[in-house]
Image (cartoon, rainbow, N blue to C red):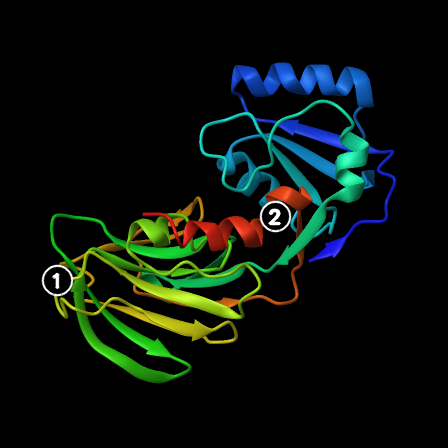
Amino acid sequence: MANNKNTFENIAFVASDHRDAREAADRLISHYGNADPDDADAIVALGGDGLMLQTLHAHMNTKVPIYGMHRGSVGFLMNDYNEESLRERLAAAKTSVIHPLRMEVRGDGNKTQEALAINEVALFRASYQAAKLRIWVDGKLRMEEMICDGVLVATPAGSTAYNHSAYGPILPINAQLLALTPISPFRPRRWRGALLSNDAKVRVEVLEADKRPVNAVADHTEFQSVLDISVEEDPSIDMHMMFDSDHALDERILAEQFRY
């Protein structure tokens, strides 16, 4: 993480549909103005973690840093809300650079599609039947068959989200790792997942796809009835998230590991 040297004269504001977020945006815009996001020194996102993910996706290739302020429900990726001295807060903030996962999906007719994920890529069973999955890592077969509700690959930024709810490990934000985590595994019952290098390529094959349909999700982009997926980090895309120095993401992720 690095400190910012910008004076942040040009700030763009985006807000969720939550009333508190819209009202906060109106007040902040009246005081600081509202720059075009493509020309801004920073984008301030007002809402919860869902809005932060949407904003990161929308401005993924611009390299404009994004600073979230909590005006929603879940706010793990957000800073505390405060309308005062915003430019000074932005100038003093620390920046975390993160990279998304790129998912390639193969479906019926061998048609392939792609999507990017900041938090995780996940496979879910799409019927009452448990999924049967086969897992490859870097071209080597690692799991011949897993009967489960699904499996996910999480980034460090996403490791505290659904991955953690599925009993996956929390990863430090700057760890060069990915978490491969099963969702409600039935067989093998005791397998709890794996830690992989961030340059690993994961392929998951759906077995008995006609009988046991499976959907694939990259953050909020979903594909139905997939046959297999490939997932790897895309290091060519940098996303810059800004945090107050006393609210840094790496510290909150570390603290989360000691919660009980």
Count of marks, rendered view: 2
Q: Give how far across and how far down residue 201 sits, in percent.
A: 45, 75
Camera-side residue: 256 or 179?
256
**Residue at the disc numbered 1:** 186
Q: Callout 2: few (<14), some (14-19), or many (20+) C-alpha neighbours within 10 Å?
A: some
User: Is 36 on the left-hand or right-hand side of 52?
Assistant: right
User: Is 89 on the left-hand or right-hand side of 190?
Assistant: right
Position above or below: 5 against 139: above
**Residue at the disc numbered 2:** 248
Q: Give how far across and how far down residue 58 sits, in percent.
A: 62, 42
Q: Give the amino acid type for the residue marked by disc 2 in the picture.
A: Ala
Position above or below: 236 against 129: below
Q: Give how far across and how far down residue 108 sits, in percent.
A: 31, 60
Quadrant position of residue 23 = top right
Residue in view at x 71 percent, y 49 percent: 94
Q: Callout 1: few (<14), some (14-19), or many (20+) C-alpha neighbours within 10 Å?
A: some
Q: Give the amino acid type for the residue marked by disc 1 in the picture.
A: Phe
Which dot, 2 or 1, sits closer to the camera? 2
